[in-house]
Image (spheres, helix red, strand yellow):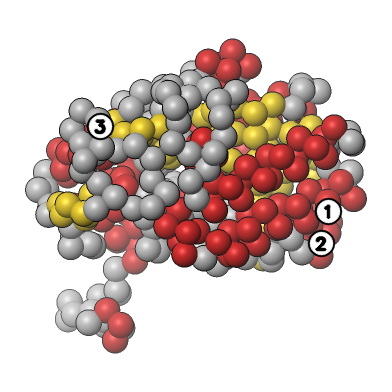
Amino acid sequence: MATLVTGGAGYIGSHMILRLLDAGETVVVIDDLSTGHDWAIPGRAHFVKGEVSDPKALEAACKLADIDAVIHFAGSVVVPESIADPLKYYRNNTCASRALIENCLAHRIGSILFSSTAAVYGDPESCPVAEESRTLPLSPYGASKLMVETMLHDIAAASDLRYGALRYFNVAGADPQGRAGHSTVGATHLLKVACEAALGVRDGLTVHGTDYATRDGTAERDFIHVSDLVDAHYLALSHLREGGASFTANCGYGQAYSVLEVIEAVKTASGVDFPVHLGPRRPGDSMRVIADNRKIMSLFDWQPAYRDLTTIARHALAWEHKLGTRNAPDKKADGSVDVPPDQT
């Protein structure tokens, strides 16, 4: 049997592929490479370039291996962009997922793990926030993901489909072995942006909102290391394959760090005191979101290994160093480099 990973050329998907391959799994990837990189897909994985909503892409993937489960990461993930362009998010997240689910059922693929988000909770009334809490997204991004959760629930009730919806909190860090990391160009994730600022790729960063009712005035988030996240996925995949019931579960550590605390962790790890600018709040941002993770801890024998913020920052920074070396212009014999016009 084999696992199909959609969006496998992206940040979390590339780490998931490594976790599956490390376990001896056969992996097939579908990705359109709109934000991911083909070099992020390990050579041992089969690759189909295409849209996840295209039945021909899934048909091609099924010809490469006997797929019995799908881990669905593909989609758009930037909250401010979703507010500016909601149609893109309902197309890429909701409509594309509906098509994928329909195509999976047509190929008798009965297990799907869905990449959902804590954004479905909006601004929680209390924290930590449990899966049974009110869902009231503040952005089309969160709403588009919640719609997919609803579809999975309804389709599972009317068919043999079994699913897991994993609601991510703030994913950060990189593979401890340096094999993968966050490589998306123009990414908006706080820890990646801070690492880029530390390395001089960005001219500092802006903190959006300093007047929240938190310990230092900045928003607080539950940061989860990407390697711990994909371990949770692997346990969830085994659960479904063994006939386990469908579920929805939070993926977080149940502890919060503020924006300023994350920035300070990167400054400490890098030894660089990069510029930090203060700006107003952004639409769609919540003050505080922390996971109640008791459900996932009770469902699986999940034992997070990298929950320390210093470790997360160090792994992320190491990847940015490696990525910078990879993306650096090739040196000539005289030590000079060719710089494309758009970089001058």
Q: Which mark is residue 37?
A: none
Q: Amino acid at mark 3?
A: Ala
Query: Crowdedness of circle 3 by 10 Å Cα count: few (<14), some, many (20+)?
Result: few
Pointer 2 residue: 55
For the N terminus, the image quarter is top right
The tag earlier along the polypeptide, 1 or 2, is 2
Indicate the secondary structure of the residue bearing disc 2. helix
Residue depicted at 81% across the width and 62% down the height: 55
Query: Crowdedness of circle 2 by 10 Å Cα count: few (<14), some, many (20+)?
Result: some
The tag earlier along the polypeptide, 1 or 3, is 1
Residue 32 x/y as whole percent = 62, 65
Indicate the secondary structure of the residue bearing disc 3. loop
The single residue placed furthest to the bottom in the displayed view is 341
Q: Amino acid at mark 2?
A: Pro
Q: Is residue 42 visible?
A: no
Residue depicted at 53% across the width and 51% down the height: 141
Pointer 1 residue: 103
Pointer 3 residue: 213
Q: How many marks?
A: 3
The tag earlier along the polypeptide, 2 or 3, is 2
The quadrant holding residue 3 is top right
Q: Nearer the viewer, mark 2 or mark 3?
A: 3
Q: CA distance from mark 2 to mark 3?
A: 48 Å
Q: Is residue 97 above or below residue 49?
A: above
